[in-house]
Image: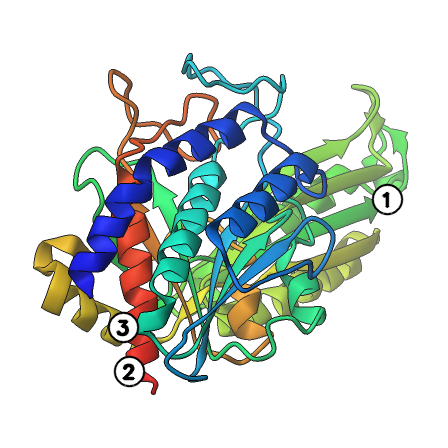
Amino acid sequence: MLDTILAKAEAVFEDIVEIRREIHRHPELGKEEIKTSSLIKEQLAKYGVDEILAPDGTSVIGVVKGRKGSGRCIGIRCDMDALPVLEATGLPFSSENSGVMHACGHDLHTAMMLGNAKILADMREEFAGTVKLIFEASEEKQPGGARAIIDSGTVDDVDVFLAMHVLPTEDGLGKVGLKKGSVTTSADEVYITVHGKSGHGSQPQEAKDAILAASQINILLQQIQARNINPLDTCIFSINSFHGGVATNIIAGQCKMAGAMRAYTEEARAIATEKIYDICAGVEKVSGCAIDAEVIKGYDACINDDKIVDALASAFEGTLGPESYYFMKEPLGFSEDYSFFGSMTGKPSVLMFLNAGHALGMEVSTLHSPDCTFDEAAMQHGMAAMTHSVLALLRKMM
């Protein structure tokens, strides 16, 4: 079966490159993926999937049913939205939508998923079970697209969720990165407003200094990791907006601060959230200022299922070989609303990573940067690895 997968991934590769470039030329922001969604539906129909579902907005689900029996159901998910970034790659298929760019590889994700649809549809006589190919809209834009798909009920029958995210890399093109447990952080927004009392700079005793109180809060937030979180865990605070005061000789009567909080575990996240409110209450009492604090819950951390990771590693080791994958030494610092497919449904899920190199003649850049590029050859490896993962798990779960 592996030889068939590899041959079919090679056969569809040229088509997938064209699709990727078409999507890259015409990037669309979250909730606006009209053309991308239409292209996906058109290609799914062309590739002969059994059903095409519209769970919410511009999201799409393609369904492929194995002909050897009902079996279990695996959901594989990709994201499809672009970012508000002005592209600077100079690629011949650069964005034609000024100020919008596929700078996080979602064009590759979508194209590879369509390749998976083609391969699985062609091989449906050879497996039992169902595969749902989930094309998620608006991953980059809170509240994301995953929750709406889950709430639609269209993935209620999925037993295991899989996803693959490309990474710009210097070497190891096509290798799949696996990790047990936490693999990305949660992402919450923190908003704090300090209401003090303005006064003359020469008479601080008659005022309530909002900037001083806000500064104390910021310093104390940074101590949460050092004194309240397990040293083996991590919680990151970054106050990225801090505004107060109107003149050099007037004590500020108000100061607003906002930022992000990221954690790898729900335990650290819960402790940190509680401490934010405790700190604000304490500073409020000491400073005499009134303080409004709000933590807006965003994406959960992605927690990979250990047993599924072991099963995938075993499948890669026994067929694609030990050079086809590696175990990641540490989790990544960004966030993914793919996490909800696990945390909201209670089903096992795994987020894999694909070493996707960089464009010829260009240096490796980071995700979300205007010069972020990838080596398209990685997509052939990605399609083969994902298809192999799906079929190996379906066989194992029979």
Kind of residue indicated by mark 2: Lys
Asked whether 62 or 215 is in front, the reply is 62
> Which kind of residue does numbered mark 3 sit on?
Ala
User: Residue 64, relative to residue 398: is it above or below?
Assistant: above
Of all residues, the one furthest to the bottom in this rendering is 398
Q: Nearer the viewer, residue 331 or 37?
A: 37
Q: Position of residue 102 (x, y in %)?
A: 51, 31
Which amino acid lies under the numbered mark 1 shown in the image of this protein? Gly
Mark 1 or mark 2, whichever is nearer to me? 2
* Residue 330 seen in this snapshot: no
Distance in Å between CA atoms under marks 1 and 3: 62 Å
Residue at the spot of label 1: 196
Q: Would you identify the image quadrant in which residue 298 lies?
A: bottom right
Q: How many marks?
A: 3
- Where residue 138 appears, x then y in whole percent? 64, 47
From the image, tell me which residue sits under label 3.
Answer: 392
Residue drawn where x is 58% and y is 26% of the image:
26
Left/right placement of residue 164 relative to residue 359 reads: right
Q: Secondary structure at mark 2?
A: helix
- Vertical relation: 389 (above or below) 103: below
